Image: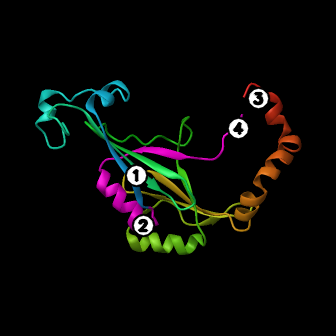
Amino acid sequence: MKARSFSHVGITVRDFNTFVRFYWDVFGCPLVGVSDTPPERVRSFFGVQPPALSDAASPGGGGGVEGAPSCKIGWIRVPGGAVLEIFEFQPQQPHVQGPWNRVGLTHFSLNVRDTQKWHDYLVRKGVEIVSKPERSPRGHTFFFAKDCDGNLIELMDLGYMHYVLDWLGPLGGLLFRRGMYKQYYETHRDF
């Protein structure tokens, strides 16, 4: 058994509309679907409980039926086929940014051409830049920025390796499994 391709990454957002506008305005990623989740599913599947009565009276505290938890789900398509699945829950929990060395997801990456041009474009758009473009030892360039909710995005120009990975990736995987990366496959046969 093997996976067919990368499908999507899920992101919980503060404000659904703001997030959708950011990814459309900055990266040209369209919203391709929206769904409102029934309150009972929000409780049972996502484990989100109704807000306390005092919270239900506050702005954004109940969503939908007063006192019932809510979840709006959307799908934003990234050029190339991946999808950002976004969730706006009510009530919300505060954002907690984890450090790089904590186990779990730290960022996602978008393939681009000309990272310096992208860096300058994002600066003009007022996007928070975390690092300037730099070159890796293997020759690709990259930098980090944050989206409207503070999620880390790595913008990466793989150069010619984009085409190598796109066209020769399956062959390279086969060769590396039997060659220089063989040790990783021998010790993890349970996978």
Give residue 100's quadrant in the image: top right
Q: Secondary structure at mark 1?
A: loop
29 or 127: nearer the eye?
29
Left or right of 171 on screen, residue 30: left
> How far is disc 3 from disc 2 in space, using C-alphas?
40 Å
Question: Closer to the N terminus: mark 3 or mark 4?
Answer: 4
Q: Bin the neighbour count of mark 2 within 10 Å (Cα to Cα): few under 14, some 14-19, many 20 and up.
A: some
Between 74 and 138, the one nearer to me in the picture: 74
Asked which quadrant contains residue 179, the reply is top right
Is disc 2 in contact with disc 1, using a CB cutoff of under 8 Å? no
100 and 41: which is toward the camera:
41
Q: Residue at x 16, y 31 (%)?
A: 67
The label shown at residue 188 is: 3
Which residue is disc 2 drawn over? Answer: 26
Say which label, 2 or 1, has the lower sequence index: 2
Which residue was labeled with disc 4?
A: 2
The Cα–Cα distance between marks 1 and 3, rounded to whole angstroms, is 35 Å
Q: Disc 1 or 3, which lies upstream in sequence?
A: 1
Q: Are marks 3 and 4 in contact (CB under 8 Å)?
A: no
- Dot 4 falls on a residue whose secondary structure is loop
Q: Give the distance between the C-alpha atoms of the residues marked 2 and 1, in whole angstroms.
A: 15 Å
Residues marked 1 and 4 touching at CB (< 8 Å): no
Q: Nearer the viewer, mark 2 or mark 1?
A: 2
Amino acid carrying label 3: it is His
Range of residues picked out in magenta: 1-29
Residue 28 painted magenta: yes
Q: Residue at x 22, y 28 (%)?
A: 50
In percent of width and height, residue 98 lies at: 47, 40
Residue hosting label 1: 150
Q: CA distance from mark 3 to mark 4?
A: 15 Å
